[in-house]
């Protein structure tokens, strides 16, 4: 079964982009192509082949916002100096359940978490 050309035109893609952790190390992460285009999130696609993928289990920094109807949305922020993280950009766009863009105002920031692999206990 072939998909409708209209549906195929509406499907968004994911791209590899660069995430810089709190220690200044660069990693790649798959990101919605529309989000990479938002300069406030701090994404870059320069030389993505030069960096390893963000380790599994690590949680990147993000902001939480509320749209005009009080629904929450989240945005991953790729750099510590990105406008959404430092506060020079107060809102970001999220896609609502109605598939329309909604402007969410930042109300909270979440630091990244680097989860270490679990080491099994040693037996006496």
Image (cartoon, grey):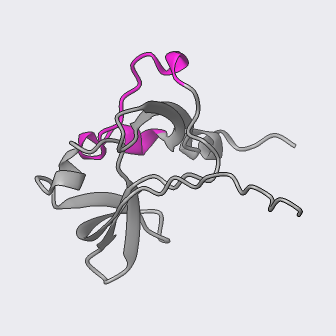
The one of 41 and 12 positioned closer to us in this rendering: 41
Where's residue 71, x and y in %? 37, 80
Q: Write the start and end of the magenta stretch as one range.
A: 33-51
Where's residue 58, x and y in %? 55, 51
The one of 8 and 111 positioned closer to us in this rendering: 111
Q: Left or right of 54: which side holds 1?
A: right
The one of 87 and 96 positioned closer to us in this rendering: 87
Q: Left or right of 48: which side holds 83?
A: left
Whether 31 is drawn above or below 108: the answer is: above
Whether 73 is drawn above or below 22: the answer is: below
Q: Examine the image and state in which quarter residue 66 appears.
A: bottom left
Q: Left or right of 32: which side holds 6?
A: right
Q: Magenta span has 42?
A: yes
Specify the quadrant that holds the N terminus.
top right
The one of 107 and 100 positioned closer to us in this rendering: 107
Residue drawn at x 39%, y 69% is: 73
Q: Magenta span has 1?
A: no
Where's residue 88, x and y in %? 10, 53
* Name of the residue lying farthest toward the bottom: 70
């Amino acid at each position: 079964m072939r998909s409708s050309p209209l549906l195929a035109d509406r499907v968004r893609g994911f791209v590899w982009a660069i995430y810089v952790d709190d220690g200044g190390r660069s990693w790649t992460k798959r990101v919605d192509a529309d989000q990479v285009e938002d300069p406030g999130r701090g994404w870059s696609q320069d030389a993505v082949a030069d960096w390893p993928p963000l380790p599994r289990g690590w949680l990147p920094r993000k902001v939480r916002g509320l749209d005009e109807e009080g629904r929450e949305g989240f945005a991953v922020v790729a750099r510590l100096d990105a406008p959404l993280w430092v506060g020079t950009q107060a809102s970001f766009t999220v896609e609502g359940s109605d598939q329309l863009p909604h402007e969410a105002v930042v109300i909270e920031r979440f630091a990244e978490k680097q989860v270490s692999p679990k080491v099994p206990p040693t037996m006496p």
